[in-house]
Image (cartoon, helix red, strand yellow):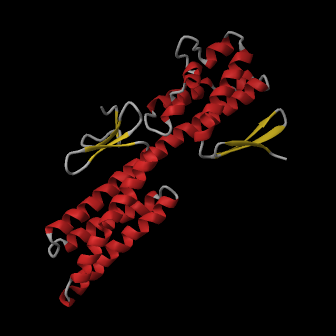
């Protein structure tokens, strides 16, 4: 059962996330496939499926007669764009390149469809639609990472102020907003950590749950500090950005899941 559509506001989306954090994708035969996580789903939609049709499209292009030389060149451009998809995934993935690829493919299809047999038309349509799905998946991945990065950076500041006993510098609305936003992350590989008991306790969930604000307000600063640090460490492996943090004169570099002391 889908608990979140991808993209979230789409009414006709054929993709979504189930309770286990897997990506559910409906194909053109009406079957639904389960993909373990969003990274695998991006690779499948952006690269593997288009590449599976590449050779058939290339073979058809080679079979065109001289009178269709212009169309042959347009099909060659389509093949070049399919080949470029592997470079997009090196950064997993470049939205701008993919957006341009989608627009160009749609334009090429309109110009080519008068000479294309039905099977090649179907294959080009599939290549077009899976790239659109891939773009939606990349945007969902970016949304999740932005929320995680903001939460980690907010918790780092809270830990700094708790360590330095500068409690008045904690801006609680930002803390509440950052932790609440984690609830909107449903997909693997992020779900395992954002839904972890350590994170939920800090948000006030569960038998021992108590919000960090309530702990600080009750004078339990040491417990608040300990729980903030545990939650920070739980989310750190899925933090994808870079941050410098100074605590009591020591500067820490937090980068892509690791903490180093700056000399």
Q: Position of residue 175 (x, y in %)?
A: 59, 27
Residue beneath the point at 44% across and 32% down: 184
Q: Is residue 203 above or below residue 157?
A: above
Give the camera-side residue of 53 and 236: 53
Residue at coordinates 21% horizontally, 83% vertically from top-left?
A: 64
Q: Quadrant of the N terminus?
A: top left
Residue 208 drawn at (x, y percent): 58, 12
Q: Nearer the viewer, residue 167 or 3?
A: 3
Position of residue 127 measured from the top left corner of the image (x, y, whole percent):
29, 61
Instruction: Point out residue 137 in the picture as x, y percentages from the top left corner.
Output: 40, 48
Q: Quadrant of residue 59?
A: bottom left
Taking 141 as reference, is 212 above or below it? above
Q: Is residue 161 above or below residue 215?
A: below
Question: Which quarter of the figure has residue 67?
Answer: bottom left
Lateral position of residue 151 relative to residue 71, left or right: right
Q: Residue placed at 38% from the left, 30% from the top?
A: 19
Quarter residue 16 falls in: top left
Q: Nearer the viewer, residue 59 or 228?
A: 59
Q: In the drawing, does residue 240 fall left or right of residue 52?
A: right
In screen coordinates, is 31 left or right of 92? left
The number of numbered badges drawn on the structure is: 0
Q: Residue at x 38, y 70 (%)?
A: 81
**Most distant residue in the bottom direction:** 66
């Amino acid at each position: 059962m889908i608990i979140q559509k991808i993209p979230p506001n789409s009414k006709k989306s054929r993709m979504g996330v189930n309770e286990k954090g897997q990506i559910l994708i409906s194909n053109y035969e009406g079957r639904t496939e389960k993909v373990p996580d969003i990274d695998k789903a991006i690779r499948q939609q952006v690269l593997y499926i288009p590449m599976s049709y590449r050779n058939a499209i290339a073979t058809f292009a080679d079979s065109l007669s001289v009178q269709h030389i212009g169309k042959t060149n347009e099909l060659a451009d389509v093949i070049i764009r399919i080949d470029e998809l592997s470079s997009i995934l090196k950064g997993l993935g470049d939205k701008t390149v993919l957006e341009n690829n989608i627009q160009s493919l749609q334009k090429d299809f309109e110009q080519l469809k008068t000479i294309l047999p039905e099977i090649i038309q179907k294959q080009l349509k599939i290549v077009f639609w899976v790239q659109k799905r891939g773009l939606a998946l990349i945007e969902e991945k970016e949304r999740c990472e932005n929320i995680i990065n903001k939460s980690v950076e907010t918790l780092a500041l809270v830990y700094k102020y708790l360590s330095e006993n500068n409690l008045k510098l904690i801006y609680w609305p930002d803390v509440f907003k950052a932790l609440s936003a984690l609830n909107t992350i449903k997909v693997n590989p992020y779900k395992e950590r954002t839904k972890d008991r350590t994170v939920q306790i800090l948000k006030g969930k569960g038998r021992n749950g108590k919000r960090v604000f309530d702990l600080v307000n009750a004078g339990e600063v040491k417990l608040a500090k300990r729980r903030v640090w545990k939650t920070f460490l739980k989310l750190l492996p899925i933090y994808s950005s870079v941050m410098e943090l100074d605590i009591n004169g020591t500067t820490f570099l937090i980068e892509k899941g690791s903490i180093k002391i700056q000399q």
